[in-house]
Every structure is written in C-alpha cells, then in structure tokens.
Amino acid sequence: MADGDSLIYLNKFDSPKGVMIAMCDEEVMGRVLKDGKVEIDLKQYGGFYKGELVSEEQARRDINGRVYSANVIGERSVKLLIDAGLVKPEEVKSVQGVPVVHLFKVEK
C-alpha cells in the first residue's frame, strides 16, 4: 500500500445466514453526522465499525462473499458496495453530505 492511501475500517460478524459487515471510511470515524432528525454518532458508537483497518482492495475482497447485511458509511466504502452490485447508486442516502447505506437481506 502506498503512503497516503486512505484506509477503511471493516468489522465482520458471522451469522448462520451470512456475514454482517460494518464499514466506515477512516476519515469519517470520530465524527457526529446530523441531518434533521437523523444522527450517526461515530464518536460514541464508532467501535461498532472499528474492526480491522484495511486497504480498499482488501475491503473489496472481503465484501465479495456472502454478505447478509451491511452498515456502511463514507464515499469510498459505499462505492465498494455499489461496485460489488450489492446496492444501486439511487439507494444510497446521505447524512451531512456523507454517503450511508444500511443493507438488509430479507428472506421468507
């Protein structure tokens, strides 16, 4: 990895139905994002996302498995989900200008 490359926090939780991931761009961690009634507190609750600090390439490899659900924050992290075909650009929300995706696979 070259100097200056931005990293992504990636936390994975295994479940019988697949992997749940929490992913957040490194530079967003520690912020409190607010937009109307929506608040994402990555200062107090950032630990949920703080798994391994990985390169974008490593995160790409890790999310190309059986993702059951995902909580993803940040431009680069969300783009990885889009590139993997797990979410469409029009499904991405934004809180204080930061892209946010909550993805849940619902099965009957």
Image: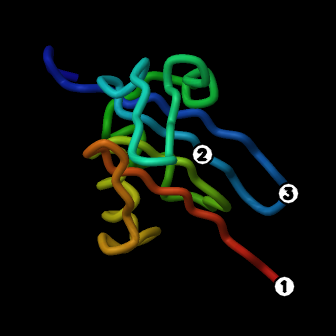
- Which kind of residue does numbered mark 3 sit on? Pro
User: Closer to us: mark 3 or mark 2?
Assistant: 2
* Number of numbered markers: 3
Q: How far across and how far down the image is residue 15, in percent?
A: 81, 51
Residue 80 x/y as whole percent: 34, 53
Q: Secondary structure at mark 2?
A: strand
| Quarter of the figure that contains the C terminus | bottom right
Residue topped by disc 2 = 21
What separation in Å lies between label 3 and label 2 (alpha carbons)?
A: 14 Å
Q: Which mark is residue 108?
A: 1
Pointer 1 and pointer 3: residues touching (CB < 8 Å)? no
Q: Which image quadrant is residue 57 in?
A: top left
Q: Is residue 56 left or right of residue 18?
A: left
Residue located beneath label 3 in the image: 16
What coloring was used for the rendering? Answer: rainbow
Give the label on residue 87, or none.
Answer: none
Residue type of the residue flagged with mark 2: Ile
What is the CA distance from the residue labelled 1 to the residue labelled 3? Answer: 15 Å
